[in-house]
Amino acid sequence: MSNVFIAFQKNEDSRAIVNAILADNPGAIVSDQPAMVKIDVPGHLVVRKSTIEEEIGRAFDLQEMQVHLITMSGNVDETDDEFTLTWHQ
Amino acid sequence: MAVKSIAPYEFEQKDTADKFPTPLLYIGWEDHKMFCAPFCAPMPPTMKFGDLVNGALPGMYGAHPDFARIDWDQAEWFMSGKPFTPDMDKTLAEHGLGHKSVIRFRTPGLTGLSGSCF
Amino acid sequence: MDMKATKKLGLKERYNLMTRDLAWNPSYQAVKDVFPYMEYEGIKIHDWDKFEDPFRMTMDSYWKYQAEKERKLYAIIDAFTQNNGHLGVTDGRYINTLKLFLTGVSPLEYMAHRGFAHVGRQYPGAGPRVACMMQSLDEIRHAQTQIHSLSNYNKHYNGFADWRHQHDRVWYLSVPKSFFDDAVSAGPFEFIVAIGFAFEYVLTNLLFVPFISGAAYNGDMGAMAFGFSAQSDESRHMTLGLEIIKFILEQDPDNLPIVQAWLDKWFWRGYRVLTLVAMMMDYMLPKRVMSWKEAWEIYAEQNGAALFNDLARYGIKVPKGWEQACKDKDHLSHQAWNVFYNYGAAAPFHTWAPSEKDMEWLSAKYPETFDKYYRPLWQHYAKEQAEGKRFYNGTLPMLCQVCQVPMFFTEPDDPTKVAYRESEYKGMKYHCCSDGCKHIFDNEPEKYAQSWLPVHQIYQGNCFPEDVDPTQPDFNPLAEVLRWYKIRQGEDNMDYADSPDKKNFENWRSQATGN
């Protein structure tokens, strides 16, 4: 099963997003690099608005994530509540 | 495949011989990649092969320590990858070398810096 | 009074209202006349509404988030400038990677802007049109932010000032230039498969992660800032590329062989352009991020494998040339740096032989190949340089007709042998560096017979300044070509060791840390 991944710039807002992803994706592997954090998950990754809002302590529009996004891998699907990456294999 | 287009697709070739003052020849010295790629140089078709070897090659390849050790009698020559034996007194044209021909030479026993083929 | 909060529209509904539902089918002009490029490539689209932009960006969101990125970015650029941030980089050699970037990559951002604006107009579907328009805006933003960011370096260092002039003329820059010219002069479907998918999805991480991480590792906040700012747009671009290719494949089975052929061609063309990145990572970064080999293994072999497994359900196969690119990973960067070492007098950035420490790293990262094939070369060069005989190659190289790179590439199974491939077209010989480029030539010889090859153009006499006088006794054709390139002898070119850049960097740094 191949990994999907998502990578963010390192800043205070993305820290909350990363924590949310780790909470919602049990198979996640974090790779911490200068100025960038990359998260790999086998097959499927979900970013959940409600979890981010708990972490960040304010309302959060999922599209705001794009300001911090560096790169990603997998098929994207997005609604108001969830942003997912999936390999169909 | 050929180019797909919505109108006739007819354009001039950029590098026909008539565009050059002198036709181009490509020359490579096998196993000496210190010279990162084969050379491209204008060589008149009337030039004798011997003048290419003795006149042009030293300037091109002299910087390599192997160059001074070459025994030209042992050198092997290739034209478009096929072996040929040059006649030092015949011209490039007489050898069938023309615009954008490619020749290589190999100097058996000489395999570059510490045998690395550089 | 009973106040009922109206239910907000969901993301999907908002997106449809602001894109698809604002589109219309022309009724007073024929669709074929409004969209004239849709049929000639042989691609069949039956229902444009089936294209779904997964990011579902509407223009209002776009402006909001792009504006925020700009504000953040320019604040960082200002801070970097005010603080003499350039003196914080690891070593003055690092700055040469930025010269490579500005001359080679930034103009491509501009061409991507042009290309996406064009195809965005040409597709009948509202969804792809909106996505292409946003990408076109992103790309000009990238060009602008890179120019702004790097203008700070231009104040202090050589080799930046004439990037635009040089992109159109200098020998190695015809490699990226011809790559994009090839794409924008292809049809709209080929363009989007070439750039949107093959470049922006399959290969993008191999361009941007090395440069941006390189910036981060080497203390370059300016480049890092624009890099990350651009990357956040890249995710949308990647998604467009992947979605469009799935859309095209789902529309008609006849599209598969056409798309596969484009994938084969453009993977190979993009891979050849990445030669410059390979050598940058392994030889030009004072503090290295990872080796080209490692980057290839992560971003191509692992990630690419995942991607092609996913696309297998459409009948897509791994691109031709994939296997060779994987074999090359142990050799590419070393051989490529040798080209620039050879022709260091003709490039507007500095070159140098790796130090002992550098070679320790290279040896560790390339245990099977570095010491055997490449160490002797660098040791020889170092020795010659120490004796005052730094090697500069004075004869012009043979170039590949398609990728336009000097023909340094070796046979896939023998890294000691230069690869030569020959074709004939209209009675003339054409030469390529590899099976990959030869296939591209043989498929469309009419196109590649038009390649503006810098070496051939020099020999045709087309690369001299207007005031050149070949009758002068001291006429030096190569010096005149450098003048035409606007490469200033002894300033922009030659070894780093003798450069004004090195002197200045070290001088200013000592001034910044002493009294």
Image (cartoon, rainbow, N blue to C red):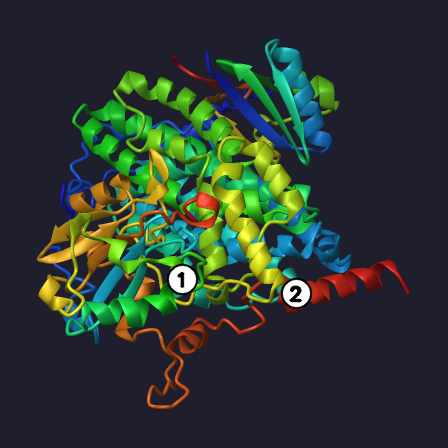
Q: Which residue is mark 2?
A: C501
Q: Chain of mark 1?
A: B
Disc 2 residue type (three-letter): Asp
- Front residue of C484/A6: it is C484
Residue C461 in the image: above or below residue C252: below
The part of the image, by quadrant, that contains residue A28 is top right
Query: Are the residues at dot 1 and dot 2 in contact (C-beta closer than 8 Å)?
Result: no
Tell me if I can see residue C3 in this picture. Answer: no
Residue at 40% over, 53% down? B36
Image quarter (top left, top right, bottom left or bottom right) of the N terminus of chain C: top right
Position of residue C259 measured from the top left corner of the image (x, y, whole percent): 24, 32
Asked which secondary structure carries label 2, the reply is helix
The part of the image, by quadrant, that contains residue C427 is bottom left
Crowd tier of the residue under label 2, counting other residues whose Cα lies within 10 Å: few below 14, some 14–19, many 20 or above: many
Q: Chain of mark 2?
A: C
Q: What residue occupies the far top of the structure in this picture?
A: A26
Position of residue C67 measured from the top left corner of the image (x, y, whole percent): 60, 46
Image quarter (top left, top right, bottom left or bottom right) of the C terminus of chain C: bottom right
Residue C285 in the image: above or below residue C102: above
- Front residue of B84/C68: it is B84
Residue at 55% over, 63% down? C390
Crowd tier of the residue under label 1, counting other residues whose Cα lies within 10 Å: few below 14, some 14–19, many 20 or above: few
Disc 1 residue type (three-letter): Ala
Lateral position of residue C191 relative to residue C218, left or right: left
Residue B73 in the image: above or below residue C469: above
Q: Which residue is mark 1?
A: B68
Q: Nearer the viewer, mark 1 or mark 2?
A: 1
Residue at 60% over, 22% down? A39
Tell me if I can see residue A72 in this picture. Answer: yes
- Front residue of A15/A55: it is A15
Lateral position of residue A41 relative to residue A11, left or right: left
